[in-house]
Image (spheres, helix red, strand yellow):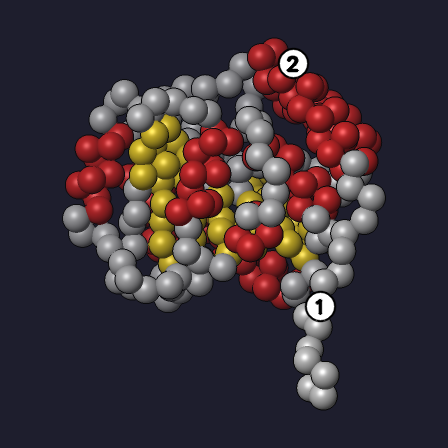
Amino acid sequence: MTANDTPAVSVVIPAKDEIGNLPGLIEEIRIALDGTEFEVIPVDDGSSDGTDRMLAELRETSPWLRPVRHAKACGQSCAVRTGMLHARGDIVVTIDGDAQNDPAYIPAMVAALNAAGPAVGLCAGQRVGRKATTFKRYASRFANKLRGAILKDNTRDSGCGLKAVRREIFLRLPYFDSWHRFLPALVMREGYGICHVDVVDRERRHGASKYGVFDRALIGALDLFGVWWLRRRRKSVPIVSEIPANGE
């Protein structure tokens, strides 16, 4: 596709210092979406490893690649939001820049969201075969169970970076840092359903994780109750229809 086309699918990649992972990941996305009108929007979140120069080189031969950059690091949620706001597709897929999410699952997630119909706003990937330390796996499992019990978002693994969401619904969601981990609950707050696709986790190929267990847990606990409050404060979702002129 050309830079002027309107794609069916936009893929957003939040990334900070992932120069070793992004080229291969972007190529995998191209292969996975072959035959589809698509665009890929890597969001360089203030990297210092030359990611911006690498993306500029890739863009020369890839008109479907539309990289953007934050002047300084703003965090993964902000990078996801920046990519969403730049996206042109009706469906936007998010995928982590560390290449642990497999792009081969993107077509299945888009298909599941389309098949579910307009009443479903998001398809969430749920990792199986999680590639993390035993401690991180147990911490993540506890956090997911606590979140599910409080928010009742019907999602086993809201931390998975692979998600497909209808862009028009995304534009209605309230934003805050760490927002990307609560997308199922926030989409449900707007009155839409959620569907799921199991995805096999992969080992990180290059670099190191940007997150620790304890810093994420403390912030996540505060955010969890913030999202709970947001959901409680929305009593009903309006059903809106246009009023025609008399006689129509």
Identity, as a three-letter code, of the amino acid under mark 1 = Ser
The answer, for residue 12, to whether it is visible in the render is: no
Left/right placement of residue 217 relative to residue 94 reads: right
Q: Is residue 123 above or below residue 148?
A: below
Tag in front: 1 or 2 = 1
Q: Residue at x 58, y 12 (%)?
A: 215
**Residue farthest bottom in this picture:** 247
Residue 19 appears in which quarter of the rendering? top left
Secondary element at tag 2? helix
Q: Secondary structure at mark 1?
A: loop
Can you tell which quarter of the image residue 132 is in? top right
Q: Position of residue 55 (x, y in %)?
A: 24, 38
Q: Residue extending furthest top?
A: 214
Which residue in the protein does label 1 denote? 241
Left or right for 183, reference 4: right
Q: Quadrant of the N terminus?
A: bottom left
> How far across and down, in percent of the image, does residue 46 sit?
33, 25
Residue type at numbered disc 2: Leu
Front residue (pair 225, 29): 225
Residue 185 in the figure: left or right of residue 34: right
Q: Is residue 160 visible?
A: yes
- Give the residue drawn at x 37%, y 36%: 43
For disc 1, the neighbor class at 10 Å (few under 14, some 14 to 19, many from 20) is few
Q: Residue at x 76, y 52 (%)?
A: 237
